Image (spheres, helix red, strand yellow):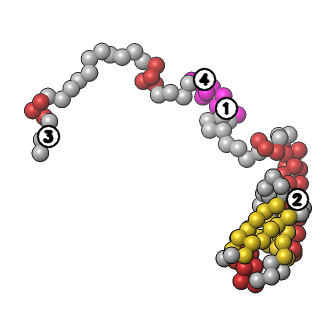
Amino acid sequence: MKLFTSLPARKDGTLIVRIKGATYVFEGKPLACEVENEAHADHLRAGNFQTEEEFDAEQKFQRLAAEREARRAALDGKAPSSRGTFSPGVGPDDEDDLDGGTGMPQESDSAPTGRVRRAARSSNVTG
Protein backbone atom coordinates (compact mmCIF):
# COMPACT_ATOMS: atom_id res chain seq x y z
CA MET A 1 0.00 0.00 0.00
CA LYS A 2 1.42 3.38 -0.96
CA LEU A 3 1.25 5.90 1.88
CA PHE A 4 1.76 9.67 1.80
CA THR A 5 2.54 12.21 4.50
CA SER A 6 2.80 15.98 4.91
CA LEU A 7 5.31 15.71 7.75
CA PRO A 8 8.49 17.75 7.19
CA ALA A 9 11.37 15.97 5.49
CA ARG A 10 15.02 15.98 6.53
CA LYS A 11 17.52 18.21 4.74
CA ASP A 12 18.16 15.48 2.16
CA GLY A 13 14.43 15.36 1.30
CA THR A 14 13.61 12.03 2.95
CA LEU A 15 11.66 10.91 5.98
CA ILE A 16 12.70 7.65 7.63
CA VAL A 17 10.19 5.63 9.65
CA ARG A 18 11.17 2.52 11.61
CA ILE A 19 8.54 0.06 12.89
CA LYS A 20 9.53 -3.20 14.61
CA GLY A 21 12.74 -3.66 12.64
CA ALA A 22 11.32 -2.52 9.29
CA THR A 23 12.57 0.73 7.78
CA TYR A 24 10.47 2.80 5.40
CA VAL A 25 11.98 5.75 3.52
CA PHE A 26 9.47 8.36 2.39
CA GLU A 27 10.80 10.52 -0.44
CA GLY A 28 9.64 12.64 -3.34
CA LYS A 29 7.23 15.52 -3.53
CA PRO A 30 4.88 14.74 -1.77
CA LEU A 31 6.63 12.31 0.56
CA ALA A 32 5.50 8.77 -0.31
CA CYS A 33 6.58 5.17 0.30
CA GLU A 34 5.34 1.68 -0.53
CA VAL A 35 4.49 -0.22 2.68
CA GLU A 36 4.08 -3.96 2.11
CA ASN A 37 3.17 -5.08 5.64
CA GLU A 38 -0.56 -4.43 6.24
CA ALA A 39 -0.12 -4.22 10.02
CA HIS A 40 2.56 -1.54 9.57
CA ALA A 41 0.38 0.30 7.07
CA ASP A 42 -2.54 0.30 9.52
CA HIS A 43 -0.23 1.54 12.29
CA LEU A 44 1.05 4.38 10.09
CA ARG A 45 -2.45 5.31 8.91
CA ALA A 46 -3.45 5.78 12.56
CA GLY A 47 -0.81 8.52 12.71
CA ASN A 48 0.10 11.20 10.17
CA PHE A 49 0.19 8.95 7.11
CA GLN A 50 -2.57 8.64 4.51
CA THR A 51 -3.51 6.74 1.38
CA GLU A 52 -3.35 8.61 -1.93
CA GLU A 53 -7.09 9.39 -1.89
CA GLU A 54 -7.01 10.67 1.69
CA PHE A 55 -3.88 12.74 0.98
CA ASP A 56 -5.43 14.34 -2.13
CA ALA A 57 -8.60 15.18 -0.20
CA GLU A 58 -6.56 16.74 2.63
CA GLN A 59 -4.50 18.83 0.19
CA LYS A 60 -7.67 20.03 -1.53
CA PHE A 61 -9.20 20.97 1.83
CA GLN A 62 -6.06 22.91 2.84
CA ARG A 63 -6.01 24.77 -0.49
CA LEU A 64 -9.71 25.69 -0.21
CA ALA A 65 -9.23 26.85 3.40
CA ALA A 66 -6.34 29.11 2.34
CA GLU A 67 -8.41 30.56 -0.51
CA ARG A 68 -11.36 31.15 1.84
CA GLU A 69 -9.10 32.89 4.36
CA ALA A 70 -7.64 35.10 1.62
CA ARG A 71 -11.16 36.10 0.48
CA ARG A 72 -12.20 36.92 4.05
CA ALA A 73 -9.06 38.96 4.59
CA ALA A 74 -9.69 40.88 1.36
CA LEU A 75 -13.23 41.68 2.51
CA ASP A 76 -12.01 42.81 5.93
CA GLY A 77 -9.04 44.73 4.53
CA LYS A 78 -6.70 42.88 6.86
CA ALA A 79 -3.70 40.68 6.30
CA PRO A 80 -4.60 36.97 6.53
CA SER A 81 -2.29 36.43 9.48
CA SER A 82 -3.90 39.20 11.58
CA ARG A 83 -7.38 37.75 11.27
CA GLY A 84 -8.67 35.92 14.31
CA THR A 85 -6.14 37.42 16.72
CA PHE A 86 -7.33 38.83 20.02
CA SER A 87 -6.12 42.12 21.44
CA PRO A 88 -7.45 42.43 24.99
CA GLY A 89 -8.89 45.78 25.98
CA VAL A 90 -8.64 47.29 22.51
CA GLY A 91 -11.91 48.00 20.82
CA PRO A 92 -13.42 50.91 18.93
CA ASP A 93 -13.95 52.88 22.16
CA ASP A 94 -11.16 51.44 24.26
CA GLU A 95 -8.03 53.13 22.89
CA ASP A 96 -7.56 55.01 26.17
CA ASP A 97 -7.28 51.74 28.13
CA LEU A 98 -3.68 51.24 27.07
CA ASP A 99 -1.35 52.78 29.66
CA GLY A 100 1.91 52.16 27.82
CA GLY A 101 3.38 50.63 30.97
CA THR A 102 6.22 48.20 31.32
CA GLY A 103 4.06 45.25 32.25
CA MET A 104 5.61 45.14 35.71
CA PRO A 105 3.44 45.22 38.85
CA GLN A 106 2.57 48.64 40.27
CA GLU A 107 4.73 47.95 43.30
CA SER A 108 7.85 47.88 41.15
CA ASP A 109 7.45 51.61 40.40
CA SER A 110 6.91 52.64 44.03
CA ALA A 111 9.68 53.63 46.40
CA PRO A 112 10.47 51.27 49.29
CA THR A 113 8.94 52.29 52.63
CA GLY A 114 12.00 51.39 54.65
CA ARG A 115 11.27 49.17 57.63
CA VAL A 116 10.34 45.52 57.13
CA ARG A 117 8.02 44.12 59.77
CA ARG A 118 9.19 40.88 61.28
CA ALA A 119 7.20 38.44 63.37
CA ALA A 120 7.82 38.46 67.10
CA ARG A 121 9.77 35.53 68.52
CA SER A 122 6.76 34.35 70.51
CA SER A 123 4.64 33.98 67.39
CA ASN A 124 7.09 31.56 65.73
CA VAL A 125 5.82 27.99 65.70
CA THR A 126 8.27 25.39 66.89
CA GLY A 127 7.68 21.71 66.69
Q: Which residues are magenta?
A: 92-101
Q: Are marks 2 and 4 in contact (CB under 8 Å)?
A: no
Residue lying at the far bottom in this picture: please name it: 38
Whether tag 2 and tag 1 are in contact, CB under 8 A, the answer is no
Foreground: 96 or 100? 100
Query: As shown in the figure, which amino acid type bears the numbered disc 4?
Result: Gly
Kindly report which numbered mark, 1 or 3, lies closer to the viewer in this rendering. Answer: 3
* SS for callout 4: loop
Q: Nearer the viewer, residue 78 or 104?
A: 104
In this view, the mark in front (4 or 1): 4
Residue 113 position within the rendered picture, expressed as x and y whole percent measured from the top left: 32, 16
Q: Earlier in the sequence, mark 1 or mark 3?
A: 1
Front residue of this view, candidates 43 and 37: 37
Q: Say whether residue 51 is visible.
A: no
Cα gap from disc 2 to disc 1, whole angstroms? 37 Å
Q: Which residue corresponds to mark 4?
A: 100
Q: Secondary structure at mark 1?
A: loop
Q: Is residue 79 left or right of residue 113?
A: right
Q: Amino acid at mark 2?
A: Arg
**Quadrant assignment for the N terminus:** bottom right
Describe the element under mark 3 as helix, strand or loop: loop
Dot in front, 2 or 1? 2
Number of the label disc, if any, that sits on residue 93: 1
Q: Residue furthest front?
A: 21
Mark sitting earlier along the chain (4/1): 1
Q: Residue at x 70, y 34 (%)?
A: 92
Q: Which residue is mark 3?
A: 125
